Image (tube, grey):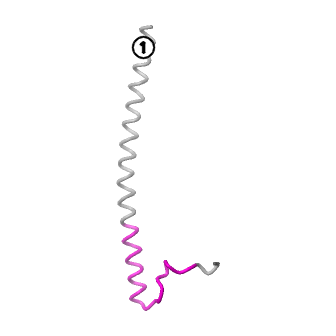
Amino acid sequence: MDKRSEALEEAVAHLTRAVDELSEVVARQDGEIALLTRRVEALLRAAAEREADAGGTIPLADQRPPHW
């Protein structure tokens, strides 16, 4: 029974380490996704402003594609 307990403790330690590492990866990816989302929003705003300054009536992003 002692070897079995030891094996279970070892397995739990490995799983705990794996969960901690995965948690760090998910947290980092969340930050990267948030940053990229802000950048895309800024690019979309800038493109819409350029298009509006060029005299377009409806921003291209708001127009329906021709196949609709």
Residue lying farthest bottom? 55
Left or right position of 55 against 67? left
What main secondary structure does the magenta stretch of the protein show?
helix
Residue in the image at 43% along x and 92% along y: 55
Residue 25 at x, y percent in the picture: 38, 45
Indicate the quadrant containing the N terminus: top left, top right, bottom left or bottom right: top left
Location of residue 57 in the rendering, given as x and y in whole percent from the top left corner: 47, 89
How far across and down, in percent of the image, does residue 40 sit? 40, 68
Q: Secondary structure at mark 1?
A: helix
Give the residue number, with chain letter if any, for mark 1.
5
Residue at image position (43%, 23%) is 11
Magenta stretch, residue numbers: 39-64
As drawn, 8 above or below 24: above
How many numbered circles are shown? Answer: 1
Q: Quadrant of the C terminus?
A: bottom right
The amino acid at mark 1 is Ser
Lateral position of residue 45 relative to residue 60, left or right = left
Q: Is 46 included in the stretch rendered in magenta?
A: yes
Residue farthest to the top, as pictured? 1
Residue density around tag 1, few if under 14, some if 14–19, many if 20 or more, within 10 Å: few
Residue occupying image coordinates x 41% and y 74% = 44
* Residue 62 belongs to the span the image colors magenta: yes
